[in-house]
Image (tube, helix red, strand yellow):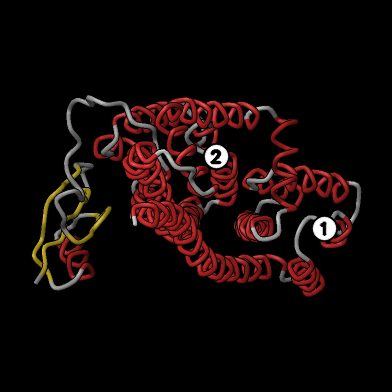
Amino acid sequence: MASFAYKAATRSGEVLVGRLECASADEAVARLQAQGHIPIRVELALDHKIRERPRRQLIRRAIGADTVTDFTRELATLLQAGVPLDRALGMLAETVNHGEMTAVVADLQSNVRQGATLADALAGHDQVFSRFYINLVRAGESGGALETVLLRLAEHLEQAKETRESIMAAMIYPVILMLVAVGAVVLLLTYVVPQFAQLFKDVGEALPLPTQIVIAAGDFMQQYAWMLLLAVIGVGYLVRAAWRRPPARRRMESLLLRLPLLGDLLIKADTARFARTLGTLLDNGVVLLNAVAIAREVVANRVLADRLAVVADKVKAGGRFSDELGDGDVLPRFAVQMILVGEESGELTSMLFRVADAYERNLRSALKRALALLEPALILTLGVVVAGIVMSILVAILGVNQLAF
């Protein structure tokens, strides 16, 4: 038996939070339903899992993707159970474990009660809900399948989160390795090398050129390390400022796309993201022209997004989607060919999902290969640098010993 934390609603609208001892989550759901409750969330009980919202928020937190995903799935669950929209929003406003999100959900409920659609209410919080999210909800409301669309939307957000987390997890080890490498070199130059520099200075003999270079680097690090730190911060600030300016950002992103390995990874990531978003929109009744305009907003690289905007204009003028994609050199040729097959067979939506699946797998494989090359390269570089510093000191020490004898 395990302990499962749950959040459920009664038929009268009261929200219940508690724990059940069950063999599985499905058994916990069945027990709640047998008691006449509507399960909102059931998961293995952990200290940081489902808990009552604190009355006061001491620290303001930004509303993250996880919070939006949880809200989406819980709202879909309540709607599927037959709870009216305004009542479901009121129940969620009482149970959201996030101060800012509570205010947002309360405002959504207020607007819905005044006669606004959910999509229109969401549009008033476009800093929290993306245009993709809002238009998908609008399509679901128009088709009378809002709860189904919300479930698909939650699945889409969760899949995007899994892809993002897998990439971040893969980058942890190389980043740590790089920090250790830089730290080791700095420690050698600022602490170890100066100890020997004083010894060589007392001897008064001419040192080998490699030793002179290492000692000079150590002296520079001791005296001007703060300047190097300021320079790094300054360069980072300038890059960030340039990134916020559209013309400069486009030039930088165009350069990134031309890099041998990184450019290929960026294109694959944007291809998968665009294809899955477009497929999701089409699958929920959004027309192709509007879907392309919305889906291009999820493309991270502005250069590719601009090309997709041109494609959308040409499709609006009567061109075929796959032909314009190929002529615009936007997506990889394989993806364009699959989309062409989807258009010709009338299975464009399913083909877009296949493209997304294929490029997500390809991206993970390419990332693993890149990291497999990066890790030994970092280790080898660190070994060469450290060995060079040590050898330059040893050569000088051997020279001093020869003089002594």
Q: Amino acid at mark 2?
A: Ser
Which element carries disc 2, helix, strand or loop?
Answer: loop
Residue 71 occupies which quadrant of the picture?
Answer: top left
Which residue is more in the foreground, 14 or 217? 217
Which element carries disc 1, helix, strand or loop?
Answer: helix
Q: Is residue 270 left or right of residue 337?
A: left
Dot 1 crowding, Cα within 10 Å, few <14, some 14–19, many 20+: many
Q: Amino acid at mark 1?
A: Leu
Q: Which residue is mark 2?
A: 130
Name the residue: 39% across, 35% down: 63
Q: Is residue 201 left or right of residue 228?
A: left
Residue 21: % across, % down: 8, 65
The answer to whether residue 358 is above or below residue 79 is below
Q: Is residue 281 left or right of residue 223?
A: right
Residue 61: % across, % down: 33, 31
Q: Which residue is mark 1?
A: 325
Dot 2 crowding, Cα within 10 Å, few <14, some 14–19, many 20+: some
* Residue 310 is at least partly visible in this image: yes
Which residue is more in the foreground, 150 or 354? 354
Name the residue: 19% across, 48% down: 48
* Residue 283 is at least partly visible in this image: no
Q: Nearer the viewer, mark 1 or mark 2?
A: 1
Q: Residue furthest front?
A: 405
Which residue is more in the foreground, 267 or 281? 267
Name the residue: 43% across, 33% down: 219
Residue 198: % across, % down: 34, 37
Which residue is more in the foreground, 43 or 105? 43
Residue 281: % across, % down: 63, 54
Name the residue: 80% across, 69% down: 340
